[in-house]
Image (cartoon, rainbow, N blue to C red):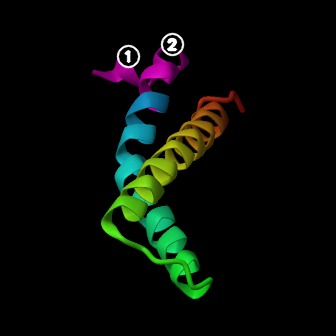
Amino acid sequence: MAELFTAQYSLLWVIALAAALFLPVRQLIWTLYVRRAEKDGAETSGEKRLDLKKRAGMTALLLCFVFSYFYVAHLFRGP
């Protein structure tokens, strides 16, 4: 089990951390998108909300992967 915590498996940890962060980050970004759309006066019907959720999903995917990559790289960096 200890060999999983080495730099050799850093890609595994990047994917695991990104997967763990994806759902909460997507929900947060989607909520912010919907609130901004309502504030701007745009109608937020079911179809519009679905489009915003897809957009939030792509944004969250990129954000979580980049954050996870840099976090794991910093974590496994030597002293």
Is 60 positioned to the left or the right of 45 in the image? right
Question: Which quadrant is home to the N terminus?
Answer: top left
Q: What amino acid is labelled 2 in the image?
A: Gln
Question: How far across and down, in percent of the image, does residue 11 sit?
Answer: 50, 20
Question: How far across and down, in percent of the image, does residue 32 sit?
Answer: 52, 73
Question: Which quadrant is home to the C terminus?
Answer: top right
Is 9 positioned to the left or the right of 69 in the image? left
Tell me the residue that label 2 is attached to: 8
Q: Nearer the viewer, mark 1 or mark 2?
A: 2
Residue 44 falls in image quadrant: bottom left
Residue drawn at 41 percent across, 48 percent down: 22
Q: In the rendered structure, which segment of residues is drawn in magenta? A: 1-13
Is 13 positioned to the left or the right of 68 in the image? left
Q: Residue furthest right?
A: 79
Q: Do the residues labelled 1 and 2 touch (CB within 8 Å)?
A: yes
Q: What amino acid is labelled 1 in the image?
A: Glu
Judging depth in this view, the residue of 25 and 68 nearest the camera is: 25
Judging depth in this view, the residue of 11 and 2 nearest the camera is: 11
Based on the picture, tell me whether residue 10 belongs to the magenta stretch. Answer: yes
Question: How far across and down, in percent of the image, does residue 17 sit?
Answer: 43, 40
Residue 47 - label? none
Query: Callout 2: few (<14), some (14-19), or many (20+) C-alpha neighbours within 10 Å?
Result: few
Q: What element carries label 2?
A: helix
Residue 3 - label? 1
Judging depth in this view, the residue of 37 and 62 nearest the camera is: 37
Residue 24 falls in image quadrant: bottom left
